[in-house]
Amino acid sequence: WSDGQTGAVAAFTQAARYWIDLIQGTCSTTDTFELMLKNRPVFDLGPDTTLCSTLTYTLMPGTLPIGTAFLWQDGDIQPGRVVQSSGQYTLRAILDGCGYNDSVSVQFVEPSDLAVAPSYDYCAGNIFSISTPGTNLVWSNGQTGPDFTTSTPGEFYVTSFDGYCTSSDTFTV
């Protein structure tokens, strides 16, 4: 081989013009070929992610050359997709016979269930107080935590953020 390899099989990693001399006894022949390397369509679907089930998530491979074909694990051939359920998503991009795969795990979690009754009665002049379970609670009067107190009637709300989802509930005092 032109690069010094010997034997019937040779491996090449660089684009170039190569030749082989075949010598058998007093006879010899030479053959030449050009090796052209094609670029794989490399892309990244992003990191594994977790988000609230009230949202959707769009998976896109980014900008790839015209002529790139796409194949998702479920047979879909569109380059991007909107995800609404938890799972492992794998995309194969193929360009000029060269392929590349990437996968991403998307997990959806349900929002916290805030259970505040819709209305409460209390005696004028007293302080009204309730407590509700939840994480990162913020009440409409600026109080934070599981406890809410007020001495004035009105409509109030509480919001909870559990790291992925925001939940809220309103009530009247």
Image (cartoon, helix red, strand yellow):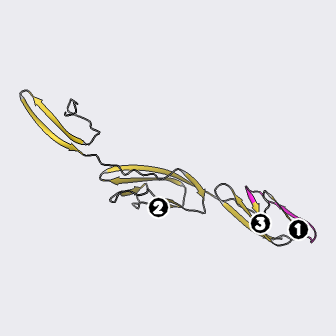
The amino acid beneath tag 2 is Arg
* Residue closer to the observer: 152 or 3: 3
Q: Which residue in the protein does label 1 denote?
A: 151
136 versus 4 height, above or below: below
| Mark positioned earlier in the residue sequence (2 or 1) | 2
Which quadrant of the rendered structure holds the N terminus?
A: top left
Q: Nearer the viewer, mark 2 or mark 1?
A: 1
Query: What range of the chain is rendered magenta?
Result: 123-137
Q: Is residue 59 magenta?
A: no
Which quadrant of the rendered structure holds the C terminus?
A: bottom right
Q: Is residue 155 left or right of residue 126?
A: left
Q: Nearer the viewer, mark 3 or mark 2?
A: 3
* Residue closer to the observer: 105 or 73: 105
Q: Is residue 134 magenta?
A: yes
Q: Position of residue 160 (x, y in %)?
A: 71, 60
Q: Residue at x 80, y 60 (%)?
A: 143
| Mark positioned earlier in the residue sequence (3 or 1) | 3
Q: Position of residue 13 (x, y in %)?
A: 29, 39
| Mark positioned earlier in the residue sequence (3 or 2) | 2
The amino acid beneath tag 3 is Ser
Q: Quadrant of residue 122?
A: bottom right
The amino acid beneath tag 1 is Ser
Q: Which residue in the protein does label 2 denote?
A: 81
Give the alpha-carbon distance from disc 2 to disc 1, as whole Å. 51 Å
SS for tag 2? strand
Q: Residue at x 8, y 32 (%)?
A: 28
Q: Which residue in the protein does label 3 denote?
A: 140
Numbered badge on residue 167: none
SS for tag 1? loop
